[in-house]
Amino acid sequence: MKNTNCLTLLFNWLASLSALALSLVLAAVCAPSTRGAGGLFQSARQPSNGNHAASSGNVNSNPIANSGAVVNIAAASLPSAGFTEADFARHVALLKKKLPSDEFEVVVERPFVVVGDGGRRAVEEHARGTVKWAVDLLKRDYFTKDPKEILDIWLFKDDASYRKHARQLTGSDPTTPYGFYSSANKALIMNISTGGGTLVHEIVHPFVEANFPDCPAWLNEGLGSLYEQSGEQDGHIRGYTNWRLPGLQRAIRRGGLTPFKDLLEMDAKTFYDEDRGTNYAQSRYLCYYLQERGLLVQFYREFLANRAHDPAGFDTLKRVLGERDIEAFQKKWEKFVLDLSE
């Protein structure tokens, strides 16, 4: 009995030491997180021809093979959501060993880890004022699950830093000067000097990936681009008109805009490779129309629930809108878009 008691005491003592060590690690690597005030987030102004769009998850997705890369901790990432503080502490400890320089600061803002070279204060402000703000509001209306892995948000202070480190992170040059989400590299890679709007856009994608894995490109990018210029109203995120509007209005005036049925049923390759800018804009302002009618959240939830029988969302769209003739509705929607101002 005495030996058993001794073993029990020894086990409890070792467990206490482990807990103390863990708390010290967390204190060293995890910054405190507070709720940032929601404001207006917008992207840097884009080319008016509509050719540029924030990148999708399949852009720049080739992991770099060189072991001297800035960071590629995919092998260390954990496979499921519901991470503990210890999980984040281990992730950050691994990440810190591979930072490109001592300029980079690391801030945990769950479910992400935010990394930046613009100074501690700037990284904390983006983490709390943009990342936490967007995550809280998006989860309030749309998403019940966090991303399945701990993802890093890289915030590079200027274009030179962004291009250099994006190449090291992914093994290829970025195809957009603003930022993108790379599912393969488990990272959001941003040129934060262009503004926080693209960051909010890209935050949408890993949440869609976790909650709506077969989401069609039109809705994935429609939601993302809707919130690249956004604010908070009555405790909910709200998208505003933005730089994508003039190009869409010109396309409507020219005639021949893609019918909604074709847009909704478009496969991802076609969506991203053919008339990409207009596809993004048309999807964004369809979501904007639903938002302005108080129907967007309802549509998302009903589409998610019925996706097995309605994979493109076309039947759900007609039902939520109360429109049987979608061609007639598109004409009404086009007039709505033409009456908007940027």
Image (cartoon, rainbow, N blue to C red):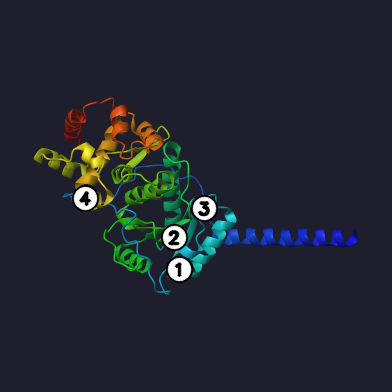
Q: Amino acid at mark 3?
A: Ser
- Image quarter in which the C terminus is found: top left
Q: Position of residue 251 (x, y in %)?
A: 14, 42
The kind of secondary structure element at disc 1 is loop
Q: Amino acid at mark 2?
A: Val
Q: Amino acid at mark 1?
A: Leu
Q: Position of residue 36 (x, y in %)?
A: 45, 45
The kind of secondary structure element at disc 4 is helix
Q: Residue most toward the left?
A: 254
Q: Residue at x 41, y 44 (%)?
A: 134
Q: Position of residue 314 (x, y in %)?
A: 28, 35
Nearest to viewer (mark 1 / mark 4):
4
Cα–Cα span, label 2 and label 4:
30 Å
List the residue tagged with mark 4: 276
Q: Amino acid at mark 4?
A: Arg
- Going from N to C along the chain, the mark reached first, 4 or 3, is 3
Q: Residue most toward the front?
A: 309
List the residue tagged with mark 3: 80
Q: Are marks 2 and 1 in contact (CB under 8 Å)?
A: yes
Nearest to viewer (mark 2 / mark 4):
4
- Going from N to C along the chain, the mark reached first, 3 or 2, is 3
Q: Are marks 1 and 4 in contact (CB under 8 Å)?
A: no
Classed neighbour count for the residue bearing mark 4: other residues with Cα under 10 Å, few (<14), some (14–19), many (≥20): some
- Going from N to C along the chain, the mark reached first, 2 or 1, is 1
Q: Are marks 3 and 2 in contact (CB under 8 Å)?
A: no
List the residue tagged with mark 1: 99
List the residue tagged with mark 2: 115
- Image quarter in which the N terminus is found: bottom right
Q: Residue at x 58, y 54 (%)?
A: 85
Cα–Cα span, label 4 and label 3:
33 Å
